[in-house]
Amino acid sequence: MPTFDAIIIGAGHNGLVCAAYLAKSGMKTLVVEGAQYPGGLAQTREFHPDFHASVAHTISHFSSKIIRDLRLQKHGYKKPNEFLPTIGMGENSEHVFISDEVTGCISDKDADNYKSYEKRMRRLAKALAPFWSETMPRVGNNNASELITFAKLGLKLRLLGKDDMHEFLRIASLPIRDLLDEHFESELLKASLSWDSLIGSKIAPRSPNSAVLTLLYRMAEQSRGRHIIPASGSKQLIDSLCKAVTSAGAEVRCSAEVDKILVNGNREGLRTTGIRLTNGETISADHIISAVDPKQTFLHLVGVDYLDIGFTNRIGRLRSDGYVAKLHLALDGMPEFTGLDKAAGRLIIAPTMDSIEFAFDEAKYGNYTEHPVMEIVIPSIYNHSLAPDGKHVLSAHVMYMPHNLKGGWTTEAHAIATQNALKTITKYAPNIPDKILGYEFLSPTDLEREFHVTGGHWHHADIAMDQMLMMRPTYEAAQYRTPIPGLYLCGAGCHPGGDITGLAGHNAAQEILK
């Protein structure tokens, strides 16, 4: 039976980051992945003959520390020099363009207010940034190192100054609608700015939760939340991570689905001993690190027999139903969006915050809206390998498509949801229907089945106040360690959360290496 120091379950970006750090430290490390290729939701795959796309169509705040530590540029990762502008698509063909400043159909007052709003949000994001790449200590019974982490957080907030510190404490759990209503008049601008605080989770502009904190998390890196598409797409990042892993001496095995995490002993004295694959092969290791979601890890791969009932109930209550569907279009040429010279950038179709709220209201009750809101990019503008010469790919995140749809995601439900999305896009790009060669619509249920993530949830669990920081995914598992000695977590269900950042993998590796 093969023996390793560490086995990592899942070759998504967090699993690969964790593996690279462990292997660099000298640990004999194996990564096992059930899919045919590594990458998870960032995997580039063919959805129509000769047309390719990935569910994660942009990168916004991947850790620059990880790029340096793992020397990813040496392994082929090339960071683009340009960030994508965010374009709020107006129904009257008058749009809002958001980058370092705001231009387009807005008032001078909104343009000026954006500068002060962005400046303050950057300061707040910068103050929090160091703590996304650290283990957040549990509350109570802390050792000296953990108390120092709390002290550093307090000091960072104090160094903001009295006004900014008060502002942070005021807005941290504020609905994003309230914050934006305070600063701006333009409904289109407010809806577009709210998008990055909402995308991927079960919240809307009026939700009294942590949308502002989520936005600050996404603004923390040098990109300040702006998005990029590398020349070879997300595949370039995944390929460079795989090279970093293998060059450090670790092994990556795909088409190796895990059936069980092996545990010895009873609740008074448990210890992980290895894994069993679905083909019956067993592999032993001192450390088992799961990059898959917490529900799958504990309820299926470990099993409730080894867990305290209170802990099992908390894992079972995690909000992990996906709310985002994916639409990919294979196009016979460049789509023409009215009012745009070229569809370069990240296009947000959400004309008002009410339009977002109404779509969310439908999803809350298990329905999809006739008027979906979405984020669109044409990734083939930047990555020419995605489509044949002269052809293009449209990739859209269609928000508020519930995993638990009333009646289920039947063939008819897929067809109706797809047509609703296409009708919405056609309002802004009338030539789209004539250019469609093929399409793919992936509901959260499809994402769950194809990528083995519970609920089809990008982030493994909602990024919300009660599921963040020292409570992510829940206490007794929020510091990457779990109630079972030898078992760790390193996926998006850990602090700091989802998106392609690599930080959960980085932080878990640091805990293991302690």
Image (spheres, rainbow, N blue to C red):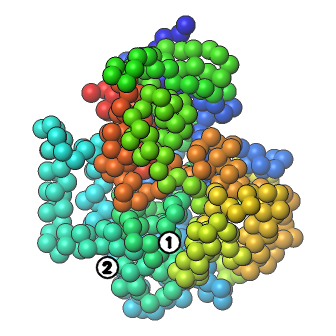
Q: Position of residue 450 (x, y in %)?
A: 69, 43
Residue at left offset 62%, top offset 14%: 281
Residue at left offset 64%, top offset 66%: 366
Determine whether, in the image, residue 230 is placed left or right of residue 117.
right
Determine whether, in the image, residue 403 is placed left or right of residue 112.
right
Q: Position of residue 377 (x, y in %)?
A: 64, 63
Q: Can see residue 80?
A: no
Which numbered marker is on residue 116?
A: 2
> Which residue occupies the foreground of this view, 278 or 421?
278
> Which residue occupies the foreground of this view, 230 or 173?
173
Label 2 SS: helix
Which numbered marker is on residue 396?
A: none
Label 1 SS: loop
> Which residue occupies the foreground of this view, 160 or 388?
160
Residue at left offset 73%, top offset 70%: 421
Which amino acid does the dot numbered 1 rest on? Ala
> Which residue occupies the foreground of this view, 322 or 442?
322
| Pointer 2 local density, CA inside 10 Å: few below 14, some 14–19, many at least 20 | few
Which numbered marker is on residue 204?
A: 1
**Residue 463 figure quarter:** bottom left
Examine the rendered structure and indicate whether residue 17 appears above or below residue 409.
Answer: above
Q: In front of the other: label 1 or label 2? A: 1
Q: Can see residue 197?
A: yes
Examine the rendered structure and indicate whether residue 184 appears above or below residue 26.
Answer: below
